[in-house]
Image (cartoon, rainbow, N blue to C red):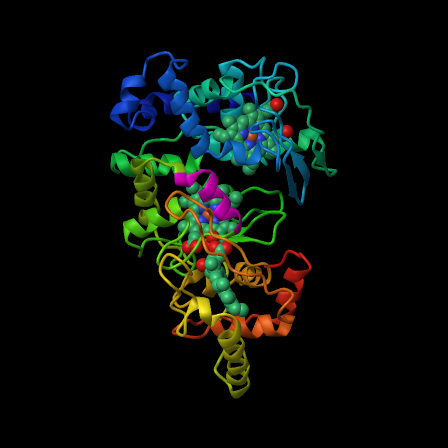
Amino acid sequence: MKGFVIAAAIASLTGLGLSFELIAAPSQAEKSTAGKSILSGQGHARGAYLAQAGNCSGCHTAQGGLPYAGGRNLSTPFGTFITPNITPDRATGIGQWSEQDFWKALHEGKSRDGRPLYPAFPYTEYTKITRQDSDAIFAHLRTLAPVAQNNPPSTINFPYSFQPLLSLWRAFYFKPGVYQLETAKSKEWNRGAYLVQGLGHCNACHAERNPLGATGGDKLGGGQIMGSNWYAPSLTSSMEAGSAGWPLEEIIQLLTTGISSWSAASGPMAEVVRQSLQHLSKEDARAMAVYLKSLPESSPRLRAAAPALSEQVQHWFQRGAKIYEKHCQDCHGISGQGAPGIYPPLAGNRGVTMTPPVNAVRSVLNGGYPPSTAGNPRPYGMPPFAQVLRGDEVAMVLSYIRNAWGNRASLVTTAQVESSREGIHYR
Ligand code: HEC
Ligand code: HEC
Ligand code: HEC
């Protein structure tokens, strides 16, 4: 264990030396702040920007609560985590923390008293953040008004509440280390990789987790979000949400406005766009898109064959088509083409056709809105159909749109719709 910690410390030190110039100071404005006191105006303004890119307030703010005062519940199969107060209040927040304590939390996943933290706090990704960026975020948090708010402790199920198990988990699945530059790649690509793998913690959602909640590295191969009925699609598969085939501008548009010519962000992704990605600078959004576009193709995590077009299946589609005409066509169009910037197309939309139908089922049952962003301030919504359509009707209309206008995908079953209705997690 000791050897592991020392090795990790060495790895992170070398990481720091390497990445300092290119990663931490990508633009002229940032270069001029490098080396200056991080408590200077520019220093914590940059910290505010970085905290937004990391969406720290997203988890550390309860619904209707004060920013960064914690108290948000994150329910997982391991228990319910309640996020801590990270305002500078001395008694209930991190007012007594030093820069070094903060760095240890982000980089090593350890609290000020040395307690190992649970990876519900995505330090498995944040460990890639440079020391300079960690200090800038800390400087920003120090400027917030202290909020005296004691949050209830997390309720973690046995055996996960047993601390030695967490230490073992960390020894197996967590290796601290700052992002390492890939020298063969461009500066822009490296900046994008740093943001996606580190601050953006995309892999915290876009990866399959094993039964112990570990993701097995930055593969972005898609997975069910723990404790929820959402599937975060693979960012490396052209059948899911890989963007290799997309023009750069479309990727940037999706990330920063929540809507593109081919799809719209919904649910947890709409939240990520609204709270975090829409605030990225032009250069950073572009860098992220460059990196995402470059990811090599992998096969989708889950794959189910489209049905043979038997008479029975055709009949099922005809009934689905009728429901579509009545309830969906006004917005999504006669041939599923949508309305640019207003209603997403369903033809050629991988959110509709990817193998796990969970998100499409949810969209139809619960409705939803793309995020409200500067680029799309008043998004048009989709009404919920849970009270309008029976389970078999939802299954029929979804099976139809998954196989109309050139789409081809597996059928959606009534059982899948009903389990979504009941909030049961399924694949
Ligand atoms: C996905 C949700 C999530 C996000 C995003 C998140 N955190 Fe947290 N954070 C948590 C949880 C949960 C804990 C508590 C973990 C535990 O108690 O073991 C935590 C703990 C912490 C702690 C340790 C506090 C203490 O008292 O020990 C710090 C510091 C912290 N987070 C800072 C940040 C910063 C800075 C960011 C953004 C860069 C951030 N967090 C983003 C969920 C999140
Ligand atoms: C809190 C969990 C979460 C995080 C963090 C997250 N995503 Fe997502 N993402 C989702 C879910 C769920 C979906 C599926 C819903 C949808 O299509 O909008 C999704 C969808 C997407 C899509 C496809 C959207 C579409 O409609 O075509 C892209 C691209 C994407 N995410 C990129 C990213 C990137 C890049 C990051 C990191 C900067 C990221 N995501 C972080 C949960 C997350
Ligand atoms: C009033 C207009 C409207 C109607 C009617 C409507 N939709 Fe939608 N639909 C939308 C909007 C807006 C979105 C984007 C929602 C979001 O981002 O959460 C959407 C999203 C979707 C999605 C997810 C697409 C993606 O990119 O992930 C599916 C699937 C879908 N609709 C299917 C249907 C079906 C099936 C019906 C009929 C039963 C229907 N819609 C009726 C407006 C509508």
Q: In x, y percent, where is residue 303? A: 49, 64
Residue placed farthest to the bottom in the image? 311
Q: Is residue 272 magenta?
A: yes
What secondary structure prevails in the magenta region?
Answer: helix
Q: Quadrant of residue 418?
A: bottom right
The residues colored magenta run 267-278
Residue drawn at (42%, 46%) of the image = 377
Q: Quadrant of residue 298?
A: bottom left
Residue placed farthest to the right in the image? 158
Q: Nearer the viewer, residue 251 or 3?
A: 251
Q: Is residue 49 above or below residue 363?
A: above
Q: Is residue 174 visible?
A: no
Residue drawn at (41%, 74%) of the image = 334
Q: Nearer the viewer, residue 21 or 346?
A: 346
Q: Nearer the viewer, residue 340 or 247?
A: 340
Looking at the rendered structure, the number of numbered marks drawn on it comes to 0
Q: Quadrant of residue 37?
A: top left
286 left or right of 116? left
Q: In x, y percent, where is residue 14? A: 37, 22
79 left or right of 379? right
130 left or right of 120? left
Residue drawn at (59%, 65%) of the image = 385
Q: Is residue 118 above or below residue 225?
A: above
Q: In x, y percent, where is residue 15? A: 38, 25
Q: In x, y percent, where is residue 333? A: 41, 70
Q: Nearer the viewer, residue 125 or 391?
A: 391
Q: Which quadrant does the C terminus fall into? A: bottom right
Q: Which quadrant does the N terminus fall into? A: top right
Q: Is residue 62 above or below residue 24?
A: below
